[in-house]
Every structure is written in structure tokens, then in C-alpha cells.
Image (cartoon, rainbow, N blue to C red):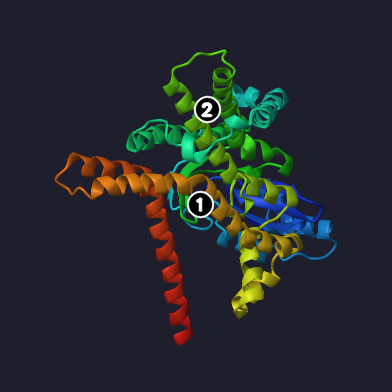
Amino acid sequence: MSTAPVRLKPLSVVPEGDDEVLVGDPASGTFVTIPAVGGVVIAALQRGASVEEAAAEAEAFAGEPVNVPSFVETLGELGFLAPGENGDAAEPVRTAPIQARRWMTSVRPELVRPFFGRVAWACYAACLLYALAVFALRPGLLPDPAVDAFPFEDVGLSALAWLPFVWFAAASHECGHWLGARALGIQTRFGVDRRLWMLVFETDLTQLWTLPRRQRYGPLLAGLAVDCVLLAALLTGRLLIDTGVWHAPELAGRLLAAWVFIKVMQMLWQSLVFLRTDLYAVLVNALGCRNLWRVKTLMLKRALSGLTAEEAAELADATDTDLRVGRWFRWVWLAGFAGVIVWFCVLLLPVFAETLSWAAEGLAEGPLTAAFWYRLLCVTLLLGPETLALVLTVKEYAGRLTARRAARAS
């Protein structure tokens, strides 16, 4: 057994229960769960102990011999060894199709920490309760897609009025995650992904796994906290107008109604836990799951069509927690499609239908008219991202189907 020390990257080791630790490389975003004795070995190696010395500590901890050389080889395969021990440094794991390559560290933790303390969280909760109370006591302020989505008589102008607020609301939500992470000294990256046929912005919070579980909730819920503050501010404007305290121009009231509708729609989207939204991440963290999404997929496939030998072996290696939660979450995920359909039909379909009907009237006049190009521009800006996401989704599933047919044929 080698007496030379093994150089590791700056790994984080976080206890996960009594029998496991979560080990990861914050720079690359790679994290794995290993038995607690592995954490003992890593701690010894980080102190500069040799493989032989680390093996002695591991044996004292476990009460039986531990194959430390084999464990070191596994660390190398995971990219956890320092350059020179196992080649070049690992590239950051990409968690979205389009993603920033560098981690963002431009905000100092002490500057934003007050915004995520107990007093701040109490204020965010109060904003949410306030919004719910306004909707309960003033039902007329509840968003009505058929009316509130179009603040201008011109449908195209209304569609254009959506865009800056949609982008601002999405950006502020993701900045909430970013600032919540920076308050804990964690780095983040921004990316663009899709959920079903919807394009979404997301913040890579992979480095949260370097922290104990109880500390992860703040950054995970920070986006919704920002949403609650923004919704409360918008509803205050609407409430002042509705009660006659603020005699605002009619257009101001219509714009506020449209923006409330957009914000409510976005917050309801985050509640769809079966689409890997913010609340899904909270659920996974609270239950201590490791790979629930994959386990859910395998369990559904086993129930509906059967698994390959490789998939069956993968499912057998899943943690007890993932298997226990997966037994009911798979059906929640399957039933969730009905929730998405309701969300789409109630909130978005009326908007899309009205916009498409308005656009069709102008497009029917032909490309030689200004109305044709104006309406084409408006409908493209409003519906283009979702149309692109839908095309990519269909293309992805078509590719999977082709691959399955090719595999069966071979």
C-alpha cells in the first residue's frame, strides 16, 4: 500500500444522516453520496495522510478493513483528485442546455445576508398572506385572463406590453435565487431550459449541496420570496384604485391587472412540483431524496412497460428514501399532466386564442400590408419561445422513439 499522500481537490463533505456523507467538488458541481467511512478517508487524505494511514483510520471507524486504494480510484473516476493525480480538472457539469460557464460571485455575502434573515422571511411570508387576503376579500381583483391579459384595445400592443414585465419578473425571480445563495457564500450560474413545451430561466444551485440540509431552504425559496414582494406591491396598487384612494389613469389600472395576472401565473407554475420547479427542489431536500426524478421514471416504466436489465439494476441500487417516495411521487407526476393542462387552459389558452385570432385577421390581408407584418411581429414575440420549446420537445421525443425502434431492430 502506498505511503505517499493523495492530493484531492477542495472537496466538501456534508453529513447526510448517520450512515452517509455527501461529497462533492463545488467547482465542477459534481456531488455523490457515499458511506460515512468514505468521509473519514477523505478527511484523512485532506490532512495529508498517506493511503496507509487513511486505511488505518477507516478500519478503526468501521471496525473492519477498508479497501482505500480502490476508493481512491473511484475518487479519480469522479474527478475528485487534484490535477497531476488524475489529469486535467473536470469541466463544470452542465445542468441546462444553455448555461453560463462561470460561477457568479460578484456580490459579497455580508451585503445581502440581512435580506434572508428571520425578519426578512417573516416579511416575505406576510406579503404572501396579504396577497391571499386581498384575493379573498376582494374577489374582483382575482386575475381574469380574458380581460386582464389585454390592457390595451389593440391586442398586439397588449402582447408587447407583456414582454418587458415577463422578462423582468423572470429575471427578478432568478436574482432572488442568486442573492439567496450569495447570502450563504454559495456560487450560482444562470441557464435556459424547458419544462414540457415552456421555455424557462433557471439558476444552477448545485453548490447548495455543500451545505447542511437545513441551510438549503433559503436559496431554494428566495425566488418565490421575491415573487411575493412583487405581487404584494402590484396588488397594493390595484387595491388603492379599487377603493378609490388612488385616482389613477385607467391605463395604469389595466397594466397593473395584467402584471398581477402574469405574476400569479408564474407563481402557480412554481407550485407544480412534478415539473422540477422550486417547490420540487424543496420537496426533495425535505425528504432527503438523492435521485427521485430518475427513480420515478424507472418505477413508472416498470409499472407500464417493463425495464431493461440495466435499468432494473439501476433501480435496485436506488436509495431506500428514493424508492419509498418514488412509489407515490410517480403517480403524482403522472396525474400532474392534468394539472398542467388545467393551468394552460385556464390561464394561457384564452390569451393565445385571442392573440392568434387577432393575428389571423391581419395575416389574411397578405404581406403587402403593414398590418400583416405588425401582427406577425407581435405574435412571434409573444408565442415564439413557447413554439420553439414545443418543437424541441416533439423533436426530442421523436428522437427517443427512433432510438428505441433501432434498438429493438438490432
Q: Is residue 387 visible?
A: yes
Circle 1: residue type? Thr
Q: Compared to 377, does 244 lie above or below? A: above
Quarter holding the N terminus is bottom right
Q: Which residue is mark 1?
A: 95
Residue in the picture at 64% in, 31% down: 135
Circle 2: residue type? Val
Q: Residue furthest right?
A: 63
Residue in the picture at 59% in, 43% down: 268
State left or right for residue 37 relative to residue 78.
right
Q: Nearer the viewer, residue 370 or 128?
A: 370
Total labels: the figure holds 2
Residue in the picture at 42% in, 70% down: 398
Quarter holding the C terminus is bottom left
Q: Secondary structure at mark 1?
A: loop
Q: Nearer the viewer, residue 270 or 190?
A: 270
Q: Quadrant of residue 162?
A: top left
Residue in the picture at 53% in, 32% down: 260
Q: Which residue is mark 2?
A: 107
Q: Is residue 109 visible?
A: no
State left or right for residue 367 relative to residue 381.
left
Of the two numbered discs 2 and 1 in the rendering, the one whose residue sits closer to the viewer: 1
